[in-house]
Amino acid sequence: MSVFTIKSSIEDMLPHRYPFLLVDRILEASPPDSLIAVKNVTKNEPVFQGHFPGHPIYPGVYIIEGMAQASVLLGVLVLQKKTDFLLVQIDNARFKKQVIPGDTLQYEIRFVKKKSSFFWFSGTVKVDSQIVASADFSAYMS
């Protein structure tokens, strides 16, 4: 069994790959309680070719997916092994501000609870210390 640390590669911990790997690095991890990770949103993101040309806005579903991926990183650090997590439920999703190219998303993930193979997390996403989105969600460890 591998032991994962904050210095492990994100690609060692997540099954996602470009262009759907939505976490660039971990800034801080305090397993099992919390994790802070970032994603730099660049004008070269493939999604901006169609969302929306001339007025690019980073999609809310990508923001939620980024929170979910950051949560998996926290789950892997807690379990100390790579495993797949499947998103089961999203609650209380709120989007407060548009995200545009040049923004750096800061995912702040908090572990809520674990029951059997189910994990619950709460996430907030900030740009320049302002909340742009938040959600509560659960995932199943397969």
Image (cartoon, grey):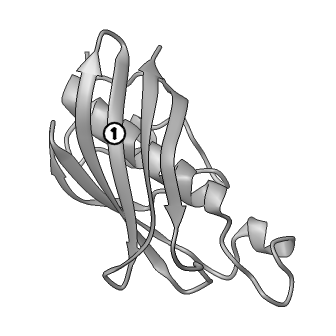
* Rendered view: 83 above or below 28: above
User: With 32 as the anchor, is 83 left or right in this view?
Assistant: right
- Comparing 127 with 135, the one in front is 135
Q: Give the residue furthest to the front.
A: 92
Q: Is residue 87 above or below residue 18?
A: above
Going 78% across and 88% down the picture, which residue do you hit? Answer: 55
Query: Residue visible at 26% across and 22% down?
Result: 114
> In the current view of this chain or complex, which residue is farthest to the top?
116
Task: Decide: few, some or many residues near mark 1? Use Cα within 10 Å; few <14, some 14-19, many ≥20.
Answer: many
Q: Position of residue 139 (x, y in %)?
A: 45, 27
> Image check: 137 left or right of 62?
left
Whole-percent x, y for residue 72 in the image: 39, 37
Q: Is residue 61 visible?
A: yes
Say above or below: 16 vs 64. Answer: above
Q: Quadrant of residue 71?
A: top left
- Amino acid carrying label 1: it is Phe
Q: Quadrant of residue 32?
A: top left
Residue at 41% in and 21% down: 83
Quarter of the image for the N terminus: give it: top left
Determine the residue positioned at 67% across, 55% down. 19
Q: Residue furthest bottom?
A: 54
Residue 51 in percent (x, y) is at 81, 72
- Report whether residue 80 is seen: no
Task: Please count the marks in the image.
Answer: 1
Please give the residue where the numbered disc 1 appears in the rendered image: 121
Q: Quadrant of residue 63?
A: bottom right
Q: Secondary structure at mark 1?
A: strand
